[in-house]
Each structure stands twice: as structure tokens, then as C-alpha cells.
């Protein structure tokens, strides 16, 4: 009886970390999906990251208008940004690519 209980404890101890690591992976995957946007005109996806945020602010600086937060921007402004962004790489915008 003691051996059965011991094996049950050992089995549980070995199984729990595997289950938890699988959950963490799913959370990271979902987090990545939240920051990916589809560009309808160019039929591609863009990942929103620090470089994209800097480019977004440069886009508004060029227009001499105050920047609107991406999440609050109308779809029309977002699409105009993607059109502009395809003409302005990180290198053209002097965005550090570290």
C-alpha cells in the first residue's frame, strides 16, 4: 500500500510541471496573436511591436497632427498608415533594429 501511494505522489509530481508548461505556452501564443494586424490592401500581416509604434508616431509627425493611439484609430487611418508603412522601412525611418 505504501508503494502505491509513493508512486502516485511521484507520478503527480512529474506530471504537474508538464501540464503547467503547456498552459504557459498557450498564453504566450495568445499574447502574440493579440498584436498581429492584417493589412487588407497589401494582403499581409504586421506584428505590432516597439518598432511599429515608433513608425506610427513618425507617421503622425509627418502629417503634423497629434498621434492617435492605435487602438483608438479608425480603420481608415489604420489602412492609410499601412499604405505609408510599405513605403517606409525601419531603415528609411532610422528606427534602431536591435
Image (cartoon, rainbow, N blue to C red):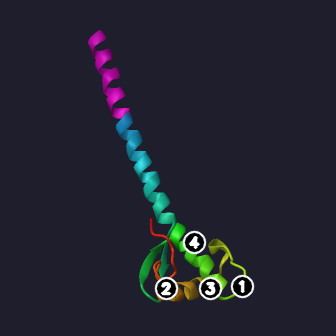
**Viewer-closest of 15 and 48:** 48
**Viewer-closest of 80 and 25:** 80
Image coordinates of residue 31 in percent, x first then y, are: 49, 58
In this rendering, which labeled residue sits more in front, label 3 or label 1?
1
Image coordinates of residue 55 in percent, x first then y, are: 56, 77
Mark 2 or 4, nearer chain start: 4
Relative to 82, 65 lies left or right:
right
| Residues tagged 1 and 2 counted as in contact (Cβ below 8 A) | no
Answer above or below: position of 62 versus 17: below
Report the predominant secondary structure element of the magenta stretch. helix
Mark seen at residue 88: 2
Any magenta on residue 11? Answer: yes
Mark seen at residue 40: none
SS type, badge 2: loop
SS type, badge 4: helix
In this rendering, which labeled residue sits more in front, label 3 or label 4?
4
Mark 3 or 1, nearer chain start: 1
SS type, badge 3: helix
Q: Residue 97 lies in what quarter of the image?
A: bottom left
SS type, badge 1: loop
Mark 3 or 4, nearer chain start: 4
Question: Callout 3: few (<14), some (14-19), or many (20+) C-alpha neighbours within 10 Å?
Answer: few
Q: Residue shown at 58%/82% (left/top)?
A: 78
Any magenta on residue 77? Answer: no
Question: Callout 2: few (<14), some (14-19), or many (20+) C-alpha neighbours within 10 Å?
Answer: some
- State which region is magenta: 1-16
Distance from the alpha carbon under mark 2 to that under mark 4: 13 Å
Mark 4 or 1, nearer chain start: 4
| Residue receiving disc 3 | 77
| Residue receiving disc 4 | 53
Mark seen at residue 65: 1
| Residues tagged 3 and 2 counted as in contact (Cβ below 8 A) | no
Amino acid at each position: 500500500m505504501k508503494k502505491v501511494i509513493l508512486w502516485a505522489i511521484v507520478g503527480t509530481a512529474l506530471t504537474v510541471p508538464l501540464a503547467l508548461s503547456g498552459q504557459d505556452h498557450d498564453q504566450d501564443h495568445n499574447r502574440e496573436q493579440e498584436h498581429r494586424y492584417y493589412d487588407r490592401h497589401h494582403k499581409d500581416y504586421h506584428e505590432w511591436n516597439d518598432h511599429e509604434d515608433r513608425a506610427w508616431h513618425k507617421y503622425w509627425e509627418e502629417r503634423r497632427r497629434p498621434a492617435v493611439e492605435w487602438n483608438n484609430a479608425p480603420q481608415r487611418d489604420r489602412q492609410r498608415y499601412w499604405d505609408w508603412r510599405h513605403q517606409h522601412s525601419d531603415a528609411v525611418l532610422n528606427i534602431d533594429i536591435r
